[in-house]
Amino acid sequence: MQHLRRSFPLIVAFFFLSRSAAEPTDAAEPPPLRWGADAEGGAPYIFKDPANPQQNIGLEVDLAAALAKELGRPITFRQYNYDSLISGLARGDIDFAMNGIEVTPDRQARLRLSRPYYTYRLQLVARKDEQRFDALESCRTADVVVGTLADTGSSRLLEEQGIKTKVYDGQAEPYQDLALGRIDAVLMDEPIAVYYARPNPLLKFIGAPFREGHYAIAFRKDQEELASEVDAALERLEKQGELARIKARWENPEGDVLADTGARLSFSRYFPLLCQAARVTIEVSVASMVIAMLVGLLVSMCRLYGPLPVRWGAIAYVEFFRGIPVLLLLYLLYYGLPTLVAHANLGFQFKPNDFTVAILAFGLNYAAYEAEIYRAGISAIPAGQWEAAASLGMSRPLTFRRVILPQALRMIIPPVTNDFIALFKDTSLVSVIAIVELTKQYQILAKSSLKYLEIGAATALLYLLMSVPLGFLARYLEKKWGRGI
């Protein structure tokens, strides 16, 4: 529950307070550098250690350790969704991003990229029995569909060649779809193909690797001093031969590393991680639902009994938050609002933490739905109940509290429970703001071991253990309160 204790003070003061700047640290002990990467990205860059799933292994993990030694500063890893890495860098959540980030003209224009630490080539992969093409150029005339990763050199090359493309977010899924016959080929970086395609007996490499590209470490434009230090450290690592040793270790794995990882990643090792992530899901869901119920009740009361301007305001709230996706709301609160405050030069820094934003986003969004549920339940109580209470001398607030609301509660319990269960599942979206909840942890573990079915079954069990008891509780309360009405 430490996340909730950290988040609620910011929730209460969301529009009035800002997080204070980081406290000064001892000059003799420089603060750790925060490295952002997505462990879901997979081999060979960063994936789970089967011997200890609490830790990551991979080429970039080894490189980060070598850089920490050269710089004389510790480097701490922060799990960050790949699609949000650049946004997190701009927000200041991380000091640098290193996650197979390719050097491209558009990134060079927006970011300060380090000297390249890895040179890769592209590799075309097809099914073992494929006879229609023997090179990338013939894919266009063969009318095939080629899978690749979004926003990469391979996707841009396919676009240039006019080849039909299917874009994926992960690097394991394209090879799975290829083996299942859903696409005809896959074009990705050779290191990825070595781990995911070469051990698969159903797949084969088409031709030799071609078209070089480079990976670099990404910094903000205003981090020139740090970037220069990292450049110098990379140069020293290259001269010492350490960079070559790291590359050699991960470029040519012996056997099927991912299959071996999956065999060693037993239930007793991965299930505690899933349980930890499930606790995060529960914390976010419960805190968000509390806010949703309180705000929803207030909004419904304003719409039912407030003066005309207040009623219109309540309607605007409901329509606004019901009309925008919660994913968009997460981005706006976490990335957009701090940027707006910074550009407005208001004299303070506003950067609510990830749990605060997640709880607020889901609380405000679901409050719109709860408000309509409450309004419908309260409106369903016959007007005669108000009149009967008035004849007994009860005031309207007292009538609402003792007569109307208790009857409405019985009717609203089922839909509110449905919303709570839906909220448990919707929290999977919070991974975009660097929170590792249950679904994100499943994706990380599954892609590190290829145990999609086994780990998926354990994940589904945890979701059921969280949601099914809510149904029983709702039915119990409905019957108990129903007897008293």
Image (cartoon, grey):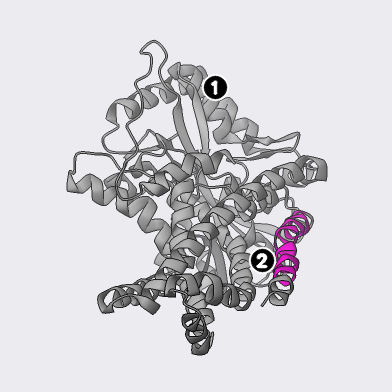
Q: Which mark is residue 178?
A: 2
* Real-space CA distance between mark 2 and mark 1, rounded to the nearest whole angstrom: 36 Å
- Number of residues whose C-alpha sits closer than 10 Å to that of mark 2, classed few (under 14), some (14–19) or many (20 or more): many
Q: Earlier in the sequence, mark 2 or mark 1?
A: 2
Q: Secondary structure at mark 2?
A: helix
The image shows residue 292 at horizontal and vertical percentages of 49, 63
Q: Is residue 456 left or right of residue 96?
A: right
Residue type at numbered disc 2 = Leu
The image shows residue 51 at horizontal and vertical percentages of 76, 34
Q: Residue at x 65, y 72 (%)?
A: 182
Q: Secondary structure at mark 1?
A: helix
In this view, the residue in front, 177 or 25, is 25
Residue type at numbered disc 1 = Glu
Q: Residue at x 71, y 58 (%)?
A: 466
Q: Main secondary structure of the magenta part?
A: helix
- Can residue 99 be seen at all in this image of the molecule? yes
In this view, the residue in front, 390 or 462, is 390
- Please report the bounds of the magenta region as a residue range: 455-477
Above or below: residue 444 compared with residue 365 = above
The image shows residue 368 at horizontal and vertical percentages of 44, 71
Q: Quarter of the image for the N terminus: give it.
A: top right
Q: Is residue 366 left or right of residue 112?
A: right
In magenta stretch: residue 312 = no
- Can residue 105 be seen at all in this image of the molecule? no
Q: Quarter of the image for the C terminus: give it.
A: bottom right
Query: Residue beneath label 1, please?
Result: 242
The image shows residue 280 at horizontal and vertical percentages of 61, 48
Residue 484: quarter of image: bottom right
Q: Residue at x 67, y 35 (%)?
A: 54
Above or below: residue 99 compared with residue 396 = above
